[in-house]
Amino acid sequence: MTMTPTILNQHEDYQQAENAYGFPLIIKQLLNRAKIASKDQTISYADKVTYTYAEFFKRINRLANVLKNMGLQAGDVVAVMDWYSHRYLEAYFAVPMSGMILQTVNVRLAEDKVLYTINHAKPKALLLNAEFEPMAKNYRHEAPSIEQIVWLDDTQYSNGGEYGEDNYRGHNREAKPTSMPDYVAGEYEVMLAAASDTFDFPDFDENTIATTFYTSGTTGDPKGVFFTHRQIVLQTLASTLASALNAEGQGARYNDVYMPMTPLFHVHAWCWPYGATMIGLKQVYPGRYLAPMLVDLIEQHKVTLSHGVPAILQMLLKEMATRGRKFDGLKLLLGGSKLNEGLAKAAIESGIEFMSGFGMSESCPVLSRAVFDDKTDSMEMTEQLNYRCLSGSPIMLVSMEIWDENGTARPMDGQSTGELVISAPWLTQSYFKNPDAGNKLWRGGWMHTQDIACMTADGTLSITDRLKDVIKSGGEWVSSLEVETILSFHPSVADIAVIGVPDEKWGERPLALVVLKPEYIDTKAEDILALGHQAVEKGCLPKYGVPSDIKFVLELPKTSVGKLDKKEMRMMHAEQSI
């Protein structure tokens, strides 16, 4: 269907041809190249299934027909509760390309919060992995918007299976899925097999909402963000371009093998499944994030391109260390929380070529990423470690400023700090059904990140802390991230978080919570704090920035997407449970 274009310039010499294609920026356009150039490339789901892009395109069509046959229409919400599979990737395309809204449900939230997000978004259909069936029992009675549930059952796959061109090898059509409840509409593969593999995806307004998901904030109920087709396409293009422009060995290439290590329910896995499919890369989807499986798949498929949070990096390093091997050619974009230099050094020594970036749930998400060029190549290791742990520079189409508390832009001199505010064409315009929170997010025409930052004259961004995590001791600000970075260099530190705790004299004092490496279990607090005192002597840290104490813990609380949960840590300290 050809759209009627809107011509803003009505000059008679610049009239658009009557039959010219308006080319809306909608998600189906991301498939254009791969349909031509990557038909024989493969997509794998862990050790269960492998099929070609040619079959992938047919499966997208089949899923669209399944949704249509269930009575769903444009504008309806379709929720997905699955681990990180080929099915999820198919839903990334088939649902929004049908004009529907894809809700990616955060299955790592507490069950009551998951139910809250379902009832808030009001999906009409739910694609449900069998592992989450206990939750679905509640939804049948407590989520009245859901009319149809599709069962996703991994027991239907035989290891190493393949989907052929005309049939589904690796899937036993005759076998009844184990314990499939009677209230579901059917099993995913059976329903796809019965559907037509042709579907005419229409054109429509590129500003149509494509996806929604809920932030896993540490206060109150999760907040829904939403993104249009245009926003996702622009983010995918800009983020992929920023990666590809980097030096050889750092950015995306046509011969990369991609595997996501960011949850597919969280900000579209940073839009990289869209980008990898747009390019036509070989892709591997790992299922649930278990360190042995991740490393197995990295080695088996020779994965070269991925992304994740520092907690995932720690998992990978620990698992590979137990195998006595190193990584070979893995490029890893890190974000979600600041990477400390101790962990960065361990990553390089383990053979991971990593780079940091910055984004947020509300920004679709990538806003900046590290740039590698001749200047970075000439850096000494210490300088390069520091650079790699910064947050890069803005990607294309992103504008950033550092504001003081009065909304005045501060200089970009590498020293002046303030709140980072941003502008880009893919930022969520508000929170779903929560305009008050949306108005707070957008003030003065800029999105407010709640991050304290500074920026150098050449545009390199350094996030110094979250506004809610800054420690105010004796009237002076202490950056918890800066202290974490310094103390992380002690060889005994596996993980670290610094929080502010009440102090009668100073108001607040920093407290370090440290997870020790098993081989350093006898380490004393003063040995680690010595690094802080040395930093004071060198002028790298104010005296009041050295923690008064260290508490050793077995693990640090993290949010559902792997970020340090400092609100929970402060609460645990107040309750004297740490």
Image (cartoon, rainbow, N blue to C red):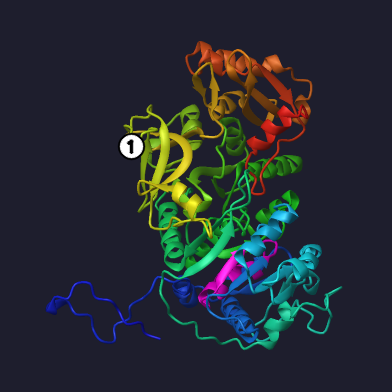
Image: magenta residue range? 81-105
Q: How many marks?
A: 1
Q: Give amino acid for label 1.
A: Asp
**Magenta-span inclusion, residue 87:** yes
Q: Please identify the quarter of the rendering in which residue 545 is found.
A: top right
Residue 155 location in percent, x, y?
Answer: 81, 71
Q: What is the residue that sits farthest to the front in this orientation?
A: 436
Q: Quadrant of the C terminus?
A: top right
Q: Is residue 62 visible?
A: yes
Residue 277 in sight in this render: no
Q: Position of residue 556 (x, y in %)?
A: 71, 35
Residue appearing at x 82%, y 76% in the figure: 177
Q: Is residue 235 above or below residue 395?
A: below
Of residues 165 and 521, the one drawn nearer to the viewer in this rendering: 521
**Of residues 435 and 428, the one drawn nearer to the viewer in this rendering:** 435
What crowding class fits label 1: few (fewer than 14 Cα within 10 Å), some (14-19), or many (20 or more)? few
Please check the rendered image and state whether residue 409 is part of the magenta-colored stretch, yes or no: no
Snapshot quadrant of residue 55:
bottom right
Q: Position of residue 475 (x, y in %)?
A: 50, 18
Q: Quadrant of residue 353?
A: top right
Which residue in the protein does label 1 denote?
458
- In the image, 393 versus 492, the foreground residue is 393
Q: Secondary structure at mark 1?
A: loop
- Above or below residue 35? Residue 382 is above
Residue at the spot x=56%, y=81% of the render? Answer: 73
Q: Identify whether 479 is placed above or below 564.
A: above
Q: Residue 474: percent from the left, percent from the top? A: 53, 16
Q: Is residue 434 above or below residue 230?
A: above
